[in-house]
Structures are given as C-alpha cells and as structure tokens.
Image (tube, rainbow, N blue to C red):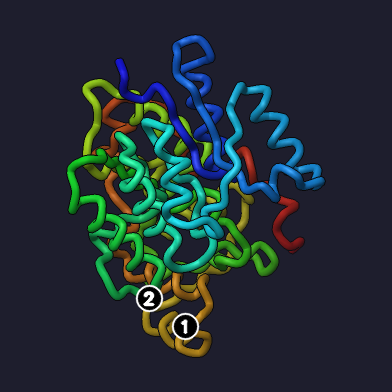
Amino acid sequence: MHHDTSILVLGAGELGMAVLRNLVRRVGKTSGVSISVLLRPSTLTSDSPGKQKDIAQLRALGVDIVPGDLVAQSDAALADIFARFDTVISCTGFVGGPGVQLKIARAALDAGVRRYFPWQFGVDYDVIGKGSAQDLFDEQLDVRTLLRSQEKTEWVIVSTGMFMSFLFEPSFGVVDMKSNSVHALGSWDNAVTVTTAEDIGALTSEILLTKPRIVNQVVHVAGDTVTYRRLADALDTLLNRKLDRAEWSVEALKRELAEAPNDPIRKYRVVFSEGRGVAWDKARTFNAQRGLGVVGLEEWMDRHLSVDQFAAI
C-alpha cells in the first residue's frame, strides 16, 4: 500500500486544522502514514498566542511541521518540498492574490505527487463558468483545466459550497444582526449549499481514504442546501420574532458592484444572487449517499447563534 503513506496539508487555518485533526483521527500514529503541514516560517516564529496554540496543537497531534511559503517561494522550490509526499491537500484559501492557486497546482504536478486536492472547497466553478463577477473563480477553472490536461497526478476536487459560518458573516450582509434583517441574494427561492469547516475536514479525510480510490473527479458534499426563505424562517423561529426581509435583486447587486468594482464581498454577492453552481441537491452528495452525519443549518444556528447577538427590540 504505497499510496498515501505521506500526506502534506498546505495551511493550518480553520479548514487546514479540521483536515489535519480528522486525518490524524482516521489514520492515527501507528499505520505507517505520516501527516505533515506546510507553515510559513513567519508563523513558526510568531509570538501571537493564537499561532502558538495552533503549533502546540499540531505537535500534540504528531503532525510534522514543514516550513514553506506558497507566495514567496518559486514553483521549483515548492515542487522540491512537495516531491517528498504522496498526497498534497491545499487548504490555503485565496492567499496571496491572483496566480497563487495555479502556482501551487503547477508545483504539485512538477513534483510528480501521486494525488493532489486543490483549494476548490467552495462552489462548482464548472457550472459557474468563466467570466463571473468573482474573477478569482476564473483562476479556479484554469487550475481544473491544468489538472485535467495531464494523467500523471491524480486529482480530487471537493465541492462544499460556502462555509456555513460565512452565511452569518456580518460583512457578507445576508444576516444583519444589528438591524434585525435578512437579505435574499437574488430571490427568496434562491438556494446556497453550506458546510461547516469541521465537516469539510471529516468528509475530505473520508474521500481521501475511500476504497476504491476516488480519482480525477469532482465530489460534491453538503452540510445543507438552503433557500434564503428557509434561512429567514429558521431565524424567525430561533429568535421567536419576525426579522425584516429584503430581497436584493441581481440588478441591484450588479449596480453596487459597479460602484466598487474591486470589492470582493460585492463580487461574491453577485455570483450567489445569480444562483448558478452555488447549490446542489443534498441527496446526491457523497455524504448523503454514504449516510455520513453532517451539521445542518438549524443545528448550526442552535449551537452558534443566540438572541443577544441581535439588536434589542
């Protein structure tokens, strides 16, 4: 079983930590599988308590720490690092701006890694297509084209929808706790697929270890797929009151984006309002087909939201 005897996770943010915790839980310290994480040298020497806590947790898990900088180092330097591993999983998010996702993919291919999981933990870029309001998505499609153009490195893409917590992110503006309002992106019947970071970590580990191996495909998972109406109803139920509801039309959101064309949040809002490639039927997902438990919308809200986060009436 030479496959997957050494796994490198890129990044230890919320998703990277979830992937690492779940991999360690699944393959343990005894099975001859080594699990490593790539961290920036500046993170390793940082005196921030949060960073130090993460590093202590990684060491306690028995994860090897590999210094590397995805933004600063060349393709060749990254390929040298990656070449020591069978599987590379990118959990870095849109770090370092344009070009970095392609650079990491090129380095993985140049290194000849057996299997690569790119940072595509989000919407279904194939369905959205080129030229969407969110220009970062075009690069995600370029990564897919690159991976599909070769046969040496196996790849797996895990489509997860939006992080569940992002749906409630004040800056995103869908749930506005300060003004007790909910906004529908596009229409109340539009849906969005959401999954918690912890579930993405668990499901990615499951997908990685599944036999027969999953090879060269896009795998859809979902914690939940919810319409903005169901979100608003669930909030009303949780808070036992009626929040204000306002629908933000695609046209209005496009006008807002035109006023601030570089605003990433406005780009996201337009893409989600258009409703293509951002939601899929939960019944058809990897987790539903395998009967794997995930956290749904109402359960997440019960755990994370409280009445006092909203403005007093």
The C terminus lies in quadrant: bottom right
* Residue 302 drawn at (x, y percent): 60, 40
Q: How many marks?
A: 2
Residue 84 is left or right of residue 218, and the answer is right
Q: Position of residue 48 (x, y in %)?
A: 79, 47
Residue in view at x 52 percent, y 71 percent? 265
**SS category of the residue bearing label 2:** loop
- Label 2: which residue? 133
Label 1 neighbour load within 10 Å: few <14, some 14-19, many 20+: many
Q: Quick one: 82 or 306, which is closer to the camera? A: 82
Q: Which residue is mark 1?
A: 257
Badge 1 marks a residue whose secondary structure is helix
Q: Amino acid at mark 2?
A: Ala
Q: Nearer the viewer, residue 150 or 122?
A: 150
The quarter in which the N terminus is drawn is top left
Q: Residue at point 24% right, 60% down?
A: 127
Q: Is residue 83 above or below residue 2?
A: below
Disc 2 and disc 1 in contact, CB within 8 angstroms: yes
Near-viewer residue (13 or 146): 146
State the separation of the CA atoms marked 2 and 1: 9 Å
Q: Quadrant of residue 223?
A: top left
Residue found 50% across the figure and 26% down from its top:
35
The amino acid type of the residue labelled 1 equals Leu
Q: Tag 1 or tag 2, which sits nearer the N-term?
A: 2
